[in-house]
Image (cartoon, rainbow, N blue to C red):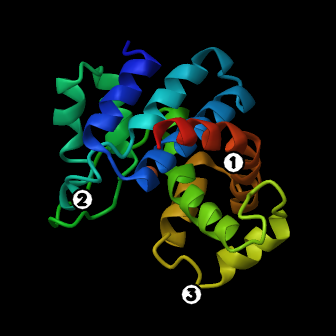
């Protein structure tokens, strides 16, 4: 299996925008948090690498998101299991070039990625509106309010997030609460990592 260091190097080969790097690091941390929380602690690094690489093709090939990824990942020596997981986070989504991604999330790890990815974007947008610009003092109640407000972070699809919760067999509230906790717990580490990247 590819190491975390190799995966990060590969990510940075195709992603230069700090916003994209930060999103990758966030999803990595959230995936590791979930692995530990859901009884997959010994696979936490692996879950994290999937999170780190999940949007690898988005910066350069946004119209072919999840379609270009297998090529980039194979070139980077990434295994087919990770490639499957990466592609499955687009399941049922029609990308810019008109293709609907048909790779279904099977493993619980893949379902968590699908559900949490879009939500981290919404939670981070909510954090940036706070005086603290942080998730650490964000209450679930205020997140729920933002979530329900259609005009807020309209680019973060509630339909995708809710489909994600459904695929996991979770109540939406559980997904919101756990993902917020995961982000709050890892925020300091991510800003530290970002200060090194920048
Ligand atoms: Fe993403």
Of residue 21 and residue 175, the one placed in the foreground of this image is 21
The residue tagged with tag 1: helix, strand or loop?
helix
- Mark 2 Cα-neighbour bin, 10 Å: few <14, some 14–19, many ≥20: some
51 relative to 96, above or below: above
- Mark 3 Cα-neighbour bin, 10 Å: few <14, some 14–19, many ≥20: few
Of residue 186 and residue 116, the one placed in the foreground of this image is 186
Evaluate if marks 3 and 1 touch, with contact meaning CB atoms under 8 Å apart: no
Residue at image position (36%, 39%) is 86
Residue lying at the far bottom of the rendered structure: 151
Residue at image position (28%, 23%) is 80
Residue labelled with disc 3: 151
Residue labelled with disc 1: 183
Nearer the N terminus, badge 1 or badge 2?
Answer: 2
Classify residue 111 as left or right of residue 83.
right
Q: Position of residue 7 (x, y in %)?
A: 38, 25
Marks 1/2: CA–CA distance: 25 Å
The residue tagged with tag 2: helix, strand or loop?
helix
Residue labelled with disc 2: 62
71 relative to 18, above or below: above
Nearer the N terminus, badge 3 or badge 1?
Answer: 3
Q: Position of residue 143 (x, y in %)?
A: 74, 69
Q: Work out whether residue 157 can be spotted.
A: yes
Classify residue 197 as left or right of residue 71.
right
Nearer the N terminus, badge 3 or badge 2?
Answer: 2
């Amino acid at each position: 299996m590819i190491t975390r260091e190799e995966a990060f190097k590969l990510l940075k080969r195709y992603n230069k925008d700090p916003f994209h790097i930060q999103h990758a690091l966030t999803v990595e941390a959230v995936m590791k948090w979930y692995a530990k929380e859901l009884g997959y602690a010994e696979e936490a690094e692996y879950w994290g690498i999937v999170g780190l690489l999940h949007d690898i093709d988005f910066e350069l090939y946004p119209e072919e998101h999840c379609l270009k990824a297998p090529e980039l990942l194979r070139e980077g020596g990434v295994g087919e299991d990770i490639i499957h997981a990466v592609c499955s986070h687009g399941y049922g989504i029609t990308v810019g070039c008109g293709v609907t991604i048909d790779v279904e999330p099977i493993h619980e790890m893949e379902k968590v990625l699908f559900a949490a990815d879009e939500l981290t974007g919404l939670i981070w947008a909510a954090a940036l509106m706070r005086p603290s610009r942080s998730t650490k003092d964000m209450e679930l109640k205020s997140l729920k309010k933002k979530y329900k407000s259609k005009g807020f972070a309209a680019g973060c699809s509630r339909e995708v997030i809710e489909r994600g919760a459904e695929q996991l067999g979770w109540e939406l509230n559980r997904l919101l609460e756990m993902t917020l906790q995961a982000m709050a717990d890892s925020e300091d580490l991510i800003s530290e990592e970002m200060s090194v990247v920048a």
